[in-house]
Image (cartoon, rainbow, N blue to C red):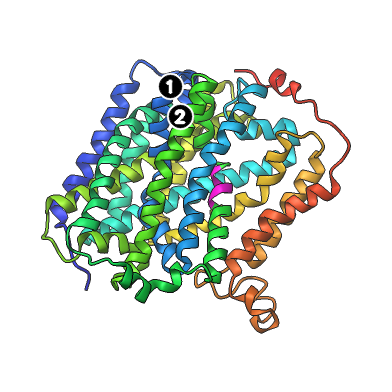
């Protein structure tokens, strides 16, 4: 039977007060500042400090307490490094590609606006679908994660936590848009930094855990070994998956275009990199530490096991603080996702339905987001694997990464070639993408028996699915690229504020 760390009355009070506080702050701040531009890009007025805080808060969802450490229990040191670099390095990449996009598309708001003009309608529809699918899965995974964590701590029903979090976040994000999201991110950033450092310090210094290098070498030596094959495959898999996905994050692209200047963009993203990387490495390393002290029986909750066991008493300051931490983590990432989805629908809605003005598309987006939130609520109430949900969303983006970002700088890949390359990547990746037990895929164990394939393929399905999804489009583009040269100057002409 699971230990109950909080009674349900304290849980619901903390849940409601924290959620309502962020909702009230976002709504009050946004009053009198509502406009389409404020909603979509915060009037392009965000300075470097606000940008850093918003980037860190929005990228740090509940998954940081679950995914890296869970991956480390089977992928070892390689998974930790791959996951950490995959999450942090995109901030450095955005300094280059973000400045490139601000130069060729100064009035832009989304990556899909660029894709439409550069690669045509078919590619645009495919990338838009992949982007929305990714954000939807991420949304569902975040709500699922917070519901499972609260259930772990107090036995509180999954559906009740999901409902409170969704309603509270929708209330201020759909009202105030990106301006409200960035303002609340700054407050959430402070809370997250203080409580995360407090939690990490407690794990190392409370006396609850007896870590030592001798114990790590004895119990988790394989995970630390440079000869561990699955460490390399796991590291490369997570790096590709997380890096590629972040490049398609509309929440990040909104902040690229919301930055006050290119200098603010460069300094904001650079600072975010240096803040994110150490936290990712430390949180991932907890997976190996948990294995060494026999606290990794449930890899998805080992952070909380290390932190709260032995049992410190119901309603202690520690457990309430950790609940506030996970709430700040999930709300900060959810408001970015909700706003990203809403802005994408607002900007691109006129490609599919004709309405009288931009405000009508904004209203339509709010109704659609509410509808999607109902589906997310139903999914989160089931408690599916968070890591698996993230990996599936990551795979969708990997296939489109090279054609789009190569085509952002080079003009020798045309509409047809880019579309074919992405489709090839999606098909090849999905054929090998494993099921939730990671022992078979559509191709291996499905269409053909597992025994028909070498062990180094059949036992590393996740790795090979991401390799194929990422590199088959790259090979296709490089082999068949044309001599044509796209005129990038027309993008600035076609996309207006």
The x and y percentages for residue 317 are 13, 50
| Residue 166 at least partly seen | no
Marks 1,2: beta carbons within 8 A = yes
Q: In what element is the residue under mark 1?
A: loop
Between discs 1 and 2, the one toward the N terminus:
1
Q: Residue at x 27, y 60 (%)?
A: 304
Is residue 186 on the magenta stretch?
no
The x and y percentages for residue 96 are 60, 32
Residue 470 in which image quadrant: bottom right
Q: CA distance from mark 1 to mark 2?
A: 8 Å
Q: Residue at x 39, y 31 (%)?
A: 181
Position of 60 with respect to 490 (left or right) is left
Residue 89, compared with residue 439, is above or below; it is above
Q: Main secondary structure of the magenta part?
A: helix
Image quadrant occupied by the N terminus: bottom left
| Residue 340 at least partly seen | yes
Residue 387 in which image quadrant: bottom left
Image quadrant occupied by the C terminus: top right
Residue 146, compared with residue 213, is above or below; it is above
Residue 27, compared with residue 133, is above or below; it is above
- Residue numbers of the magenta segment: 242-246
Q: In what element is the residue under mark 2?
A: helix
The x and y percentages for residue 221 are 41, 72
Q: Which residue is mark 2?
A: 268
The residue most toward the right is 483
> Which of 224/70 is in front?
224
Q: Residue at x 43, y 36 (%)?
A: 272
Q: Residue 393 bears which disc, if any?
A: none
Q: Which residue is mark 1?
A: 47
């Amino acid at each position: 039977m699971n230990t109950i760390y909080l009674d349900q009355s304290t849980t619901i009070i903390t849940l409601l007060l924290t959620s309502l506080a962020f909702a009230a702050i976002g709504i009050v701040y946004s009053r009198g500042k509502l406009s389409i531009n404020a909603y979509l890009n915060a009037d392009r007025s965000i300075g470097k400090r606000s940008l850093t805080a918003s980037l860190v808060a929005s990228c740090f969802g509940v998954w940081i307490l679950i995914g890296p450490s869970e991956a480390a229990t089977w992928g070892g040191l390689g998974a930790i490094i791959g996951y950490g670099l995959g999450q942090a390095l995109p901030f450095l990449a955005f300094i280059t590609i973000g400045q490139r996009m601000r130069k060729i598309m100064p009035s832009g708001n989304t990556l899909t606006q660029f894709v439409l003009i550069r690669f045509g309608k078919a590619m645009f529809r495919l990338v838009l679908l992949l982007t929305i699918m990714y954000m939807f899965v991420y949304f569902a995974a975040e709500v699922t994660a917070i519901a499972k964590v609260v259930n772990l701590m107090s036995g509180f029903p999954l559906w009740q936590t999901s409902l409170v979090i969704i309603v509270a976040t929708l209330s201020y994000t759909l009202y105030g848009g990106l301006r409200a999201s960035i303002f609340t991110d700054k407050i959430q950033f402070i809370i997250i930094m203080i409580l995360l450092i407090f939690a990490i310090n407690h794990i190392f210094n409370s006396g609850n855990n007896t870590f030592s290098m001798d114990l790590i070498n004895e119990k988790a030596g394989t995970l630390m070994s440079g000869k561990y094959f699955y460490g390399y495959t796991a590291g490369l898999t997570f790096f590709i998956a997380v890096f590629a996905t972040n490049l398609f994050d509309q929440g990040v692209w909104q902040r690229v275009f919301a930055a006050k200047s290119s200098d603010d963009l460069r300094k904001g993203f650079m600072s975010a990199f240096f803040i994110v990387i150490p936290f990712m490495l430390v949180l991932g390393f907890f997976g190996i530490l948990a294995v060494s002290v026999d606290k990794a029986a449930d890899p998805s909750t080992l952070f909380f096991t290390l932190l709260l066991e032995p049992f410190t008493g119901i309603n202690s300051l520690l457990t309430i603080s950790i609940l506030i931490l996970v709430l700040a983590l999930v709300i900060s990432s959810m408001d970015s996702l909700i706003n990203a989805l809403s802005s994408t629908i607002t900007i691109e809605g006129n490609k599919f339905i004709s309405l009288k003005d931009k405000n009508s598309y904004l209203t339509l987006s709010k109704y659609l987001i509410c509808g999607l939130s109902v589906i997310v609520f139903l999914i989160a109430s089931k408690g599916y694997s968070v890591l698996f949900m993230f990996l599936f969303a990551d795979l969708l983006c990997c296939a489109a990464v090279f054609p789009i970002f190569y085509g952002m700088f080079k003009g020798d890949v045309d509409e047809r070639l880019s579309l074919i390359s992405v489709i090839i990547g999606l098909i090849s990746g999905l054929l090998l993408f494993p099921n939730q037990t990671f022992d078979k895929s559509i191709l291996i164990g499905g269409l053909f028996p597992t025994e028909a394939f070498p062990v180094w393929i059949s036992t590393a399905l996740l790795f090979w699915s991401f390799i194929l999804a990422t590199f088959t489009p790259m090979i296709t583009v490089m082999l068949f690229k044309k001599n044509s040269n796209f005129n990038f100057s027309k993008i600035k002409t076609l996309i207006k504020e």
